Image (cartoon, rainbow, N blue to C red):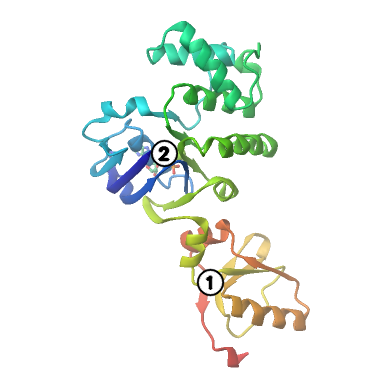
Amino acid sequence: MESIKCKNLSKTYHGGKKALKKITFSFKGNGIISIIGKNGAGKTTLIRILSTELMPTSGSAYINDIDIIKTPELIREKIAIVPQEARPIHWLSPKQNIISYLMYRGYGFFESMEKAKTALKKVSLNSNLNKINRVLSGGTKRKVLVATVLSSGAKIIFLDEPTTGLDPISRNELWDVLNKLKKDYLIILTTHYLEEAERLADKVGIIDNGKLLAFDSIDGLRKKIKYNYSLKVQGDFPKLKSYHGKVIKGIDNNYQILTNEEGSYILSKIFIKKGIRFSTNQISLEDIFYYMVKKPITEERVEEDEW
Ligand SMILES: Nc1ncnc2c1ncn2[C@@H]1O[C@H](COP(=O)(O)OP(=O)(O)O)[C@@H](O)[C@H]1O
Ligand SMILES: [Mg+2]
């Protein structure tokens, strides 16, 4: 069974930037781990260390119980990575792209050709596509890259922001592909699209400023949050004396209140009475992310009687 484990992984770059601070998590089995965080949070640094491209400053990491810091050469056949902003080779066709990658990894031509066909099918691409990569759409190019790493036979796949910059339809297509793959692979995927993690991830790691703030399933994350209901209030925030929960100022002067089920009920009644437009839901991953990463503008608790 595939497994990944790291303990107190830290990375300080030359010049003193502390990109990772004591990252600790573990996961066993197939599925998708999604690492989410803002630009500069440390996602790529983490992926580069786990894929044995970069040495950490301190800490340990194991993949399938192999110490990948001390003996990276023992794991390299089992892992494959699509780096951030990778593109397939422009002047090759998708099949040629995969064949050249496999021959580079040491396979013979005919074996590579067979593997290329299988891999392209896995991402729902026609293995006889006669176009060169340069003329393919952004989404198809990413599929070619995913097919390329799958062809290697590696069971642990790192994808660093595979859908950044894609239009919503191409992104959805790639999500379908990844959803199908997750039963047979352990995929570690970074993204700053929270919807992507919500759709795909078995476990989500929230990373901010080099720290792993949480690592859990989405339901698990929800349970950790004291306030797991969200009310969105349109327009100016009503002048309430105090709020039952946390208030976050959104774009366009809209406000969001994170509260518990009871608070949601109480506030809903008040808003209806005052004629204030609002919507209420269980919190999404986006809410959880903002709750953990952004500072709320105020926090107060009041007893129900005060309403
Ligand atoms: N090679 C490097 N040398 C120095 N600083 C770096 C290097 N690579 C990344 N950083 C810095 O480390 C932090 C984390 O970067 P990165 O891991 O690329 O974040 P993310 O992938 O989440 O955007 C950022 O502040 C970035 O500027
Ligand atoms: Mg990055």
Relative height, residue 270 to residue 277 (above, below): below
Question: x%, y% of residue 27?
Answer: 38, 47
Is label 1 in a helix, a strand or a loop? loop
For the view shown, which residue lies furthest in the top direction?
Answer: 109
Percent x, y of residue 58: 23, 44
Label 2 CB less than 8 angstroms from ligand 2: yes
Task: Choose top left, top right, bottom left or bottom right for residue 156.
Answer: top left
**x, y percentage for residue 295?**
48, 65
Quickly name the residue at label 2. Answer: 44
Regarding residue 306, the answer to whether it shows in the image is yes
Quadrant hosting ligand 2: top left
Q: CA distance from mark 1 to mark 2?
A: 31 Å
Q: Quadrant of residue 252?
A: bottom right
Answer whether residue 89 is visible to the viewer in this image: no
* Amino acid type for the residue under numbered disc 1: Tyr
Q: Secondary structure at mark 2?
A: helix
Eyeballing the image, is 28 above or below 113?
A: below
Q: Residue at x 27, y 27 (%)?
A: 74
First in residue order: circle 1 vs circle 2:
2
Residue contact between numbered discs 1 and 2, judged by CB atoms under 8 Å: no
- Name which quarter of the figure residue 243 lies in: bottom right
Residue in the picture at 76% in, 79% down: 272
Report the front residue among 262 and 191.
262
Place of residue 238 in the rendered image (x, y in percent of width and height, measured from the top left): 68, 78
* Image quadrant where one finds the C terminus: bottom right
Instruction: Work out whether residue 299 or residue 224 is closer to the camera in this orientation and state it.
Output: 224
Q: Residue at x 58, y 89 (%)?
A: 304
Tally of marks:
2
Horizontal relation, residue 200 to residue 156: left or right: right
Q: What is the three-letter code of the residue carrying label 2?
A: Thr
Q: Quadrant of the N terminus?
A: top left
**Crowding at mark 2 (Cα within 10 Å: few <14, some 14-19, many 20+):** some
